[in-house]
């Protein structure tokens, strides 16, 4: 039996009926595979391009060019034009810009170039941002801004790379995994940063619940400044608010507040995440979905209403909707739920220690793709699993959240994003966790577009369905 304790939003305490597009308030309201999302859509994955070396992220520049940008783990960004042709020369190459050679640490499969995000005013200022594991700084996360030369919009030269590099943030990493990695501009123009708990098993430093570290957080900063790396948005939950305001904002008592460290970092938007490797904003509503990679038993997808920061998502006290660490069947456990529950979750082969093995809807590492508002889908968040190749859809109806398996592909999904028409894009790699051959020698990966099955053009290359 579970008991609900204070979360970082007073809405969690106002009732027990889940509403459409609201976070669940009980474990039973957290969606699991087996539901049917509105419209019961049929989708296909249509190949756009291939030949990428350990692709880790995909984005567009929003400049009307139709180009798609694919990050490769080694430290390169490749351009795919609107016809699906892959430019031979990288848009950005971080592998030969310092005396050590590469600026990117790739010694472990979870390290490398994680993500790219283009400034909302990219067409005017040419700024774009990358997040990567730094080799000179022993794997610490580096968020760096570069500026493209208008005379060379498709290739940032090594000289230009060095000349325009501006370090925005360094995130110290105690270990080599759980780095998070996604960076993306929200509909509010702020830069959001997914930062993992720093690694090792079970978050031994309890970084997820420590408000004095950037680890285990979603961060939010304003990079629209030239005289400093970034500014703190005035409406960030910890942006200089008084203790009285924080208690009011989070709906907690003075006693509960006294247990929170007072030197909370103002960059924090939300906390209690393990490895938010991918997150997405709904292009239509601005709502946020966070694919938070789980520990040993559960993967979770977090829903956050647009502009609703300050949530505690539980890690490491919670794994998905259950207490962590698990010592047996959570249905028989007496423990309190910490924080805001996820919208959906799915199990590993064993849902808890000692559980019978079940591969019916299992996986091992959730990867978020994006929100589809086309092809019969309205606000459907799409995600996949790195191990099983399953593709899931998450949406809500009058009864609450619905979580549906849409495909089984057998592919190793690593990330998702959007093209300029807000179609959802996916990249897959072939970098086996325990047999990593290195980012330049693993089998190549591909870029895919999610389409309604009825809209697939004749002759398109489709993802193979796993049997």
Image: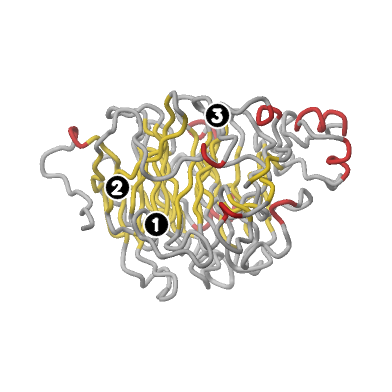
N-terminal label among 2 and 3: 3
* Crowdedness near tag 2: few (<14), some (14–19) or many (≥20) residues, C-alpha within 10 Å: many
Which of discs 1 and 2 lies nearer the camera? The answer is: 1
Q: Please report the residue visible at 26 percent of the width from the left and 51 percent of the height from the top.
A: 49
If the image is split into quadrants, where does the C terminus sit? bottom left
Q: Position of residue 362 (x, y in %)?
A: 39, 57
Q: How many marks?
A: 3
Tell whether label 3 touches label 2 (CB within 8 Å): no
Residue 67, above or below 162: above
Q: Position of residue 405 (x, y in %)?
A: 33, 45
Q: CA distance from mark 1 to mark 2?
A: 23 Å
Residue identifier under label 3: 22
Q: Please report the residue visible at 59 percent of the width from the left and 48 percent of the height from the top.
A: 194
Which of discs 2 and 3 lies nearer the camera? The answer is: 3
Q: CA distance from mark 3 to mark 1?
A: 25 Å
Residue identifier under label 1: 362
14 to the left or right of 92: right
Q: Secondary structure at mark 1?
A: loop
Tell whether label 1 touches label 3 (CB within 8 Å): no
Q: Along the line of sight, which residue is nearer the eye, 241 or 4?
A: 4
N-terminal label among 3 and 1: 3
Q: Along the line of sight, which residue is nearer the eye, 326 or 281?
A: 326
Q: CA distance from mark 2 to mark 3?
A: 30 Å
């Amino acid at each position: 039996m579970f008991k609900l304790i204070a979360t970082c939003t007073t809405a969690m305490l106002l009732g027990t009926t889940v509403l459409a597009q609201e976070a669940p308030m009980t474990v039973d309201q957290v969606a699991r595979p087996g539901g049917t999302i509105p419209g019961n859509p049929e989708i296909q994955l249509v190949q756009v391009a291939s030949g990428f070396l350990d692709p880790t992220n995909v984005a567009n520049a929003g400049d009307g060019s139709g180009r798609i940008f694919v990050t490769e783990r080694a430290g390169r960004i490749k351009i795919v034009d609107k016809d699906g042709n892959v430019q031979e020369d990288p848009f950005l190459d971080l592998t030969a810009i310092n005396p050590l050679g590469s600026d990117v640490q790739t010694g472990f499969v979870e390290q490398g170039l994680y993500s790219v995000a283009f400034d909302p005013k990219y067409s005017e200022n040419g700024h774009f941002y990358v997040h990567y594991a730094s080799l000179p700084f022993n794997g610490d996360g580096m968020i760096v801004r570069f500026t493209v030369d208008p005379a060379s919009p498709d290739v940032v030269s090594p000289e230009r790379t060095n000349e325009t590099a501006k370090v925005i943030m360094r995130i110290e990493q105690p270990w080599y995994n759980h780095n998070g990695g996604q960076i993306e501009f929200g509909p509010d123009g702020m830069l959001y940063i997914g930062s993992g708990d720093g690694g090792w098993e079970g978050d031994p430093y309890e970084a997820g619940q420590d408000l004095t570290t950037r680890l285990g957080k979603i961060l939010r900063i304003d990079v629209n400044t030239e005289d400093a790396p970034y500014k703190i948005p005035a409406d960030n939950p910890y942006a200089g608010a008084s203790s009285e305001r924080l208690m009011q904002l989070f709906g907690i008592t003075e006693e509960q507040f006294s247990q929170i460290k007072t030197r909370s970092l103002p960059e924090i938007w939300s906390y209690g995440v393990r490895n938010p490797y991918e997150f997405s904003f709904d292009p239509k509503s601005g709502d946020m979905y966070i694919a938070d990679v789980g520990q040993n038993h559960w993967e979770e997808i977090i829903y956050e209403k647009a502009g609703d920061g300050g949530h505690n998502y539980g890690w490491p006290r919670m794994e998905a909707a259950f207490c962590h660490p698990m010592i047996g069947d959570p249905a028989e456990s007496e423990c309190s739920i910490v924080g805001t529950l996820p919208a959906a979750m799915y199990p590993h082969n064993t849902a808890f220690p000692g559980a019978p093995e079940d591969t019916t809807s299992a996986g091992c590492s959730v990867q978020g793709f994006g929100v589809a508002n086309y092809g019969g889908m309205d606000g459907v968040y799409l995600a996949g699993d790195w191990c099983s190749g399953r593709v899931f859809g998450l949406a809500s109806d009058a009864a609450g959240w619905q979580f549906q398996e849409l495909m089984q592909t057998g592919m190793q999904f690593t990330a998702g994003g959007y093209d300029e028409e807000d179609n959802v894009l996916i990249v897959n790699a072939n970098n086996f966790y325990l047999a990593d051959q290195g980012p330049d020698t693993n089998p190549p990966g591909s870029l895919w577009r999610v389409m309604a099955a009825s809209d697939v053009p004749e002759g398109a290359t489709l993802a193979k369905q796993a049997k």
